Image (cartoon, rainbow, N blue to C red):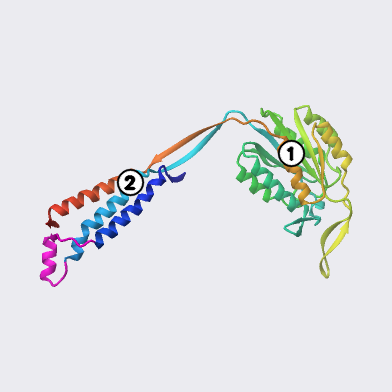
């Protein structure tokens, strides 16, 4: 629920009320306020100034409340009914040990490949507001980290929870494709895509990447492949007896298999050697995979003006009562 004024421009009238109040206080009125209370205050050595200002205070509060009521304060929310679905997207992310290589940078600082992937994937997810997106993580095994969902807040939280080695240290590319395809197969979206990201070579699981790609493509699912990492040895931080230090190791990225998988899946293969290239790749996929989404919006309003109007009328009635009884004005 969101609070708002339907006619906020009317709030400028509060400035006019404030001006009127200062004018009323400044003006020297020749009239006399005659009241029982002020008479008693006089007998006690007090002053009738306080009692004389009560009607003015009531009138000012009444006017302010009336302005707020006329501006129509209200709570509102918007519900959406999706009449035609967008794109269903399954993200398959490698979490094997090689993804901790420190050859990517964010804001000038070296970070692991997985850290950079999580940031770029998070930005991609935020752009796809009307698309259902799911997440598969894989290493030696492959499992669903998040089913397909429109809840981007939940999905982003689950992306942040991805860690190196959470699915084992080897790389089951075929299993990742199979698990992602299984999640997509029974859905009725106009377009279904699987984005596979890895920095290694298939070396685990019971199904080859090519076999999995053929099965997934038969279900009408397009596959994009992203290879992560540069072509030279990559830096890794290791713990030694003398403390942590950097070593350089070659990571075996099997580009040929990824190219075949993307070709079989009717998509494209990309190579990302740094964070900028990775971000550009997801931007390219974002632009290519667009579909028209029809959405019907329902606006729900809860009017709050009566919470201001009723007290205003009460104050007005109280002022009239006091002016005609206890605080009678004598010209």
Callout 2: helix, strand or loop? helix
Q: Which of 245 and 27 is in front in this view?
A: 27
30 sits to left or right of 256: left
- From the top left corner, tell me how far across and down residue 23 is, in percent: 27, 59
Query: Dots 2 and 1: beta carbons under 8 Å?
Result: no
Percent across and percent down for residue 165 are: 77, 51
Disc 2 residue crowd, few under 14, some 14–19, many 20+, Cα 10 Å = few
Q: In this view, does 299 lie above or below 166?
A: above
Where is mark 1, residue-wise? 285
Camera-side residue of 143 and 95? 95
Query: Residue visible at 85% across and 34% down?
Result: 210
What span is in magenta? 27-47
What residue did someone put label 2 on?
A: 307
**Mark positioned earlier in the residue sequence (2 or 1):** 1
Residue 21 showing in the rendered view: yes
Q: In which quarter of the image is residue 182?
A: top right
Q: Residue at the spot x=11%, y=65% of the render?
A: 39
Task: Check residue 29 for magenta coloring.
Answer: yes
């Amino acid at each position: 629920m969101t609070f708002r004024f339907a006619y906020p421009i009317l709030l400028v009238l509060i400035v006019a009320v404030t001006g009127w109040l200062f004018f009323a206080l400044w003006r020297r009125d020749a009239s006399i306020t005659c009241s029982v209370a002020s008479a008693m205050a006089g007998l006690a050595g007090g002053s009738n100034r306080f009692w004389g200002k009560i009607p003015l205070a009531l009138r000012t509060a009444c006017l302010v409340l009336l302005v707020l009521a006329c501006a129509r304060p209200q709570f509102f929310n918007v519900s959406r009914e999706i009449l035609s679905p967008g794109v269903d997207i399954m993200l398959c992310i490698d979490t094997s040990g090689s993804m901790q290589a420190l050859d990517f940078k964010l804001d000038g600082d070296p970070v692991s490949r997985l850290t950079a992937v999580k940031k770029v994937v998070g930005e991609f997810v935020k752009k796809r507001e009307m698309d259902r997106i799911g997440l598969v993580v894989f290493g030696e095994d492959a499992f669903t980290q998040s089913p397909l969902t429109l809840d981007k807040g939940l999905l982003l939280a689950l992306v942040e929870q991805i860690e190196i080695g959470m699915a084992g240290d080897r790389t089951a590319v075929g299993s990742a494709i199979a698990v992602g395809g299984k999640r997509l197969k029974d859905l009725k979206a106009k377009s279904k895509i699987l984005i596979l990201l890895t920095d290694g070579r298939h070396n685990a699981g019971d199904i080859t990447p090519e076999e999995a790609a053929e099965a997934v493509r038969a279900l009408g699912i397009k596959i994009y492949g992203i290879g992560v990492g540069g072509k030279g040895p990559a830096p890794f931080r290791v713990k030694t007896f003398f403390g942590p230090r950097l070593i350089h190791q070659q990571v075996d990225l099997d580009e040929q298999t990824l190219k075949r998988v993307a070709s079989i899946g009717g998509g494209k293969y990309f190579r990302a050697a740094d964070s900028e290239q990775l971000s550009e790749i997801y931007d390219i996929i974002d632009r290519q995979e667009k579909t028209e989404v029809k959405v019907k919006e329902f606006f729900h309003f809860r009017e709050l003006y009566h919470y201001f109007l009723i007290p205003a009328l009460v104050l007005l009635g109280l002022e009239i009562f006091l002016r005609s009884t206890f605080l009678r004005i004598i010209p």
